[in-house]
Image: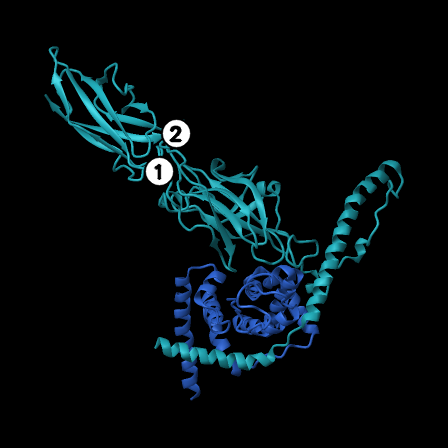
Amino acid sequence: MADFNDQFLASAFAEFRGEVEPHVKPAGTAAAHDTVHRRHRVRMITATALAALAVAAPVAAYAAVTGDPHGPPPAVTGDAPSDLPSATSSDPASLEPSVAPAVAGSAAPDGRISKADLSNATLNIPAWPKGFDEICPTGKVKFSGGKAGDRGLAALQGDPVYVDVDHDGALETVILISCSPQGSDYQVVALDRDTTGKIVTLGKVVGSAGNTGKEGSDIMTIWAIKAGDNGQVRVDVGEFRPCCEMAQASQHQWREYGWNGSRFTQTGGPAEFGPNPKVTDLVITADRLIMTKQSDGSWAGTLRVNIHNAAKVATPGKVWFGLSIDAGWQSQPGTDCPLNHDSPQNCTLPGIGAGADRSLTIRLTAPAGSLSTNSSLYAHAVDANGLVYPDRKEFGGVVANVQVVQG
Amino acid sequence: MVTLLDGGSLGSLSDNGPPRDVVFEDFYAAHFRPLSIQLFAYTGDMATAQDMVQEAFCRALARWKRVAAMDDPAAWVRRVAWNLATSRWRRTRVAAQFARRQREEHVAAPSPDRVALAQALSTLPAQQRRAVILHYLADLPIGDIARQEGVAEGTVKSWLHRGRIALAAQLTDKENYRG
């Protein structure tokens, strides 16, 4: 049936082509040359007129101050602004610019919007990703000072870039917007002006996946945007969405997006994130902890722990080691890892090289009484501020239980 | 291999590299009609289709040296024409075109009876319609359609599959009805 459909349609389209072709009446290459020349002339006149306007303002000011309506020399030369085609020209083709940037008189509205204008505009913001979509402002959103929404959760990031995304000969505005309720979500939005000058949203170029996305593979962070070639938007994306004591482990990866007439799709750059050197692969193991009763009824023992870096790169920062035990337990002086009294008790060790191990011997004492029979161990790489880098196995390899036995 | 995407060919193009010395007039003559037919199939309006194709060629002419040096200038013009067909440019020009057509001699269009296919196409979702037209009228391979549309090849196959079934069903019904 598929083959039949294919042959049937191929024949139908061939017939269609033959029937329609005689009705095509090309305007001709002379008309194309004429259009291009006319547009070139419009651009030249417009540029001259804009230059004239730039000088006319000081002339007016000079006249107001001196009473001399001729203004200071030198006078502006060139075509008068009255040579410009009016907006109601009977031939719209003559007003259509052939190349960006757009010029005055373009049939397609100039979609360039300054950062200053955007910062205090009402923008139609596409939906935010699941997770904080009810908190982050969407739909018609009034920005003030570059921020919007409850407590200014949504904010314009960086400067807009200007790209002719829909190839209509006029530039559109592309801006990066963040919303940061707990961690940050991002979206890159293309904006334009309609024929009345009102700012309209063309569409979302790309957005982060939000806190229900999959870290390590989905786009979770958007760092920056740039104008690409031929109407493309370049977006610097990353694969982690740091929140709540987590370090920013995202890589920088430039991807390109283009408008296909109805939406933006990825047109260039990698589709996947490669190995990330900031994602650790730590494995923690420990022997049984044997606690021996002392003459005063307290307990003493030695915990031997090994932290193995199974990654092909060194840990991105120092290694934080934690031991979850009952209050009153203490590490003894001279141990490899003097524990503080936070919960869990912890210490920070130097980073571990690729494939290397760090073995710890921790002498512990516990107060008299009954002993816990179990304890948990943790290990994470941390940045300079103590924020935790993600691990390949999430919690699988960075937590271990140690059995406590009476010796 | 230079792929000429409109089903036509340019004698001056080499198969072993980018085209050299492509004359705009020859290029226009080879590609204007096939492109107009594609966009007529998409829009159902011959005057609009020709207007968009002419505009695409004007944009090519304005930067002809650069376009002519491309591996596939026809693909560039086709993409611009299709972008115009789906872009806001078309919508902003509708009113102006309407006014102009009141003054100009109306462009003769194929009668509806002879273009049952165009009617059937108009019932397809836009993406399926584009995929079917690019496949059957522009003779584009799946990969080139995917590149133009900015989607995966599997997506194009899916559009084509659905479009084929819907079109064939409609056209077969019509044949049966007539027969």
**Colour cyan maps to chain:** A
Q: Position of residue A172 (x, y in %)?
A: 59, 51
Q: Which chain is blue?
A: B
When asked about the image quadrant of residue A344, the answer is top left
Q: Quadrant of residue A386?
A: top left
* Amino acid at the residue labelled 2: Asp
Image side of residue A116 versus residue B167, left or right = right
Q: Residue at x 18, y 20 (%)?
A: A302
A182 relative to B32, above or below: above
Report the number of discs. Answer: 2
Parent chain of label 2: A
Q: Quadrant of residue A379?
A: top left
Say if labels 1 and 2 share a chain.
yes
- Label 1, label 2: how many angstroms apart (C-alpha)? 12 Å
Q: Chain of mark 1?
A: A
**Residue to which mark 1 is pinned:** A279
> Which residue of the protein is positioned furthest toward the front in this rendering?
B16
In terms of depth relative to the viewer, which is nearer, B22 or A199?
A: B22
Instruction: Tell me the kind of residue under disc 1.
Output: Val
Q: Secondary structure at mark 1?
A: loop
Residue A86 seen in this snapshot: no
Q: How is the image coloured?
A: by chain
Viewport quadrant of the N terminus of chain A: bottom left
Q: Residue at x 77, y 47 (%)?
A: A51
Seen as rendered, the residue at the extreme top is A296
Report which residue position mark 2 lands on: A383
Q: Position of residue B22 (x, y in %)?
A: 62, 67
Q: Position of residue A208 (x, y in %)?
A: 43, 45
Other residues around mark 1 within 10 Å, as few (<14) / some (14–19) / many (≥20): many
Identify the residue at horizontal 44%, vertical 59% (top origin). Answer: B151
Mark positioned earlier in the residue sequence (1 or 2): 1
- Residue drawn where x is 60% and y is 79% of the image: A23
